[in-house]
Amino acid sequence: MARRLNYGSHSTLSEYENGARMPSEIVVEEYERLLQLAAGTLTRMLEAANIERHGDAWARRRVHLPLRLVPAEEPAADQVRPGPSPTADASRWSVAASPWPRQPVADGADPDAAGCSADAITAHSRRIALTERRTVIGHIELRYCPRSRAAWGRFEGFGYLDHLAGQRNDVRIIVEVLRCSDSTRLATSEQYCFDYMWSDLVTVDSGRFQARATVIIDDEAVAAGETDAQKLCP
């Protein structure tokens, strides 16, 4: 399994499977693919475990958008007909609105508040290790929403960074996105919150885009990494 997931050894997977570390969503999705499981079989378990570990979903997990508890279009009482449960038809249910005020899709907007995060894809991702060490502490993703033509950077920390954050007073993450055509670079710096963290978005043109993350502990940059520069649309 480690070889099929492109890991150099099986120790990291053993920590995941024994509950010593939390896997990333990408790893869990690869497990589903390799084990030929239905999409969401393991990612739902991961989501539940993260919520149990970190508390309320919206408090720390801004990117995960749960289904609303009411249909998008509630039928009138005299139009209700016997049939399957509404939950059987996912198309009748909509994604929960962002808890932040709605923003237009423009340079500097929050991807979630602009409605871009729900159907975004990861165009490229790269793991980040401590400087001059082979200890992987997270990964940086270049996220892209084709519908809104918007891109941003997203960072996820792994178990060892969680450990470091538990031992330190100040762990900050700088997440950046670069639009290469005009050198526009937006950066967001926040206290590490044991979950996904991202930059503001930039609108997409025909050029290339890149995401970067820097991990700072006690005012010292201990790790950094960036995605490949990608063309996101024709």
Image (cartoon, rainbow, N blue to C red):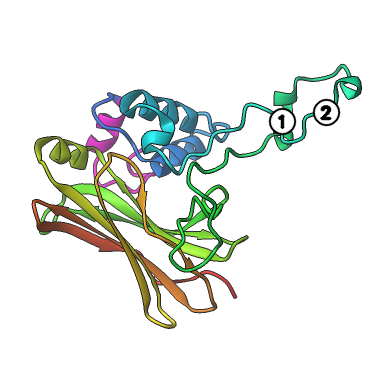
Badge 1 amino acid:
Pro
Q: Residue at x 24, y 53 (%)?
A: 173
Above or below residue 82? Residue 118 is: below
The residue that disc 1 covers is: 71
Circle 1 residues within 10 Å: few <14, some 14–19, many ≥20: some
Residue 131: quadrant of the picture = bottom left
The residue stretch that appears in magenta = 1-17
Residues under numbered marks 2 and 1 in contact, where contact means CB atoms less than 8 Å apart? yes
In the rendered image, which quarter contains the C terminus?
bottom right
Whole-percent x, y for residue 206 in the image = 54, 78
- The residue that label 2 is drawn on is 75
10 Å crowding of disc 2: few (<14), some (14-19), many (20+) = few
Nearest the eye: 100 or 196: 100
Q: Percent x, y for residue 27?
A: 39, 41
Q: Quadrant of the N terminus?
A: top left
Q: Residue at x 71, y 30 (%)?
A: 71
Kind of residue at disc 2: Pro
Disc 2/disc 1 C-alpha distance (Å): 9 Å
